[in-house]
Image (cartoon, helix red, strand yellow):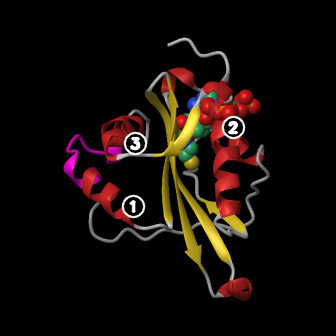
Amino acid sequence: MALTDADMVEFGPATADDVPAIVALLTDDELGRTRESNALEPYQKAFERIDADPNHLLVVGRFGGRVVCCLQLTVLPCMTHGGSTRGQIEGVRVHRELRGRGIGYVMMWWVIEQAKERGCDLLQLTTDRRRAGAERFYEKHGFSTTHHGMKLALGRP
Ligand SMILES: CC(C)(COP(=O)(O)OP(=O)(O)OC[C@H]1O[C@@H](n2cnc3c(N)ncnc32)[C@H](O)[C@@H]1OP(=O)(O)O)[C@@H](O)C(=O)NCCC(=O)NCCS
């Protein structure tokens, strides 16, 4: 695929038909391939829950009709910070063959505007420490490492 201009990627909400392409993006990743699965049904069920809840926005970027990137924004109403609204970002992926061309940058810019429109006062995310370069990618948008993330696995490995 020839792509010279990240601005040619069109962003919008994912549809049910995009689920296989999103799963492919999540799986084609050093960490993703150890934790994602070939079984589409759980992803389709997750998509139905995401799609039915206005506090979730599953984003895809399309180029030439093909899904080339994705991320998920979740709006979290909070009691803290004076009843603030936070946006949580998850599952940021750009197709392997198209990385380093600014598509991720434009996708993040797009979702930051969406978060503002949804009333978010702050955006937060975690990034696995094994992901070389990911911190630098987010820092370009002004994210900074102010907190330590902690996780506790419950249920499925
Ligand atoms: C991180 C990622 C979303 C960036 O998307 P992108 O379209 O390549 O990003 P851009 O072209 O806008 O910016 C490139 C920057 O991303 C960072 N980056 C991180 N991983 C990278 C990778 N595998 N390839 C290229 N850039 C990467 C670099 O800091 C690079 O900055 P540099 O040009 O100063 O080196 C994409 O590389 C990707 O999907 N990586 C694998 C999954 C991942 O790490 N996701 C983030 C999870 S928290």
Q: Quadrant of ligand 1?
A: top right
Q: Residue at x 41, y 36 (%)?
A: 25
Question: Which quarter of the rendering shows the C terminus?
Answer: bottom left
Quarter of the rendering containing residue 42: bottom left
Q: Is residue 130 visible?
A: no
| Alpha carbon separation for disc pair 1 and 2 | 24 Å
Picture coordinates of residue 149 (x, y %)? 59, 66
**Mark 1 or mark 2: which is in front?**
1
| Residue 32, numbered circle | 3
Question: Which element carries disc 1, helix, strand or loop?
Answer: helix
Report the residue marked by disc 1. Answer: 50
Q: Are marks 2 and 3 in contact (CB under 8 Å)?
A: no
Picture coordinates of residue 21 (x, y %)? 36, 35
Residue 40 in the magenta stretch? The answer is yes
Question: Which element carries disc 2, helix, strand or loop?
Answer: helix
Report the residue marked by disc 2. Answer: 105
Q: Amino acid at mark 2?
A: Tyr
| Alpha carbon separation for disc pair 2 and 3 | 21 Å
| Region of the chain picked out in magenta, as a range | 34-43
* 150 over 61 or under it: above or below: below
**Mark 2 or mark 3: which is in front?**
2
Q: Is mark 2 within 8 Å of ligand 1?
A: yes
Q: Is mark 3 within 8 Å of ligand 1?
A: yes
Q: Residues within 10 Å of mark 1 (few under 14, many from 20)?
A: some
**In the figure, is residue 69 to the left or right of 32?**
right
In depth, the one of 56 and 122 nearer the eye is 56
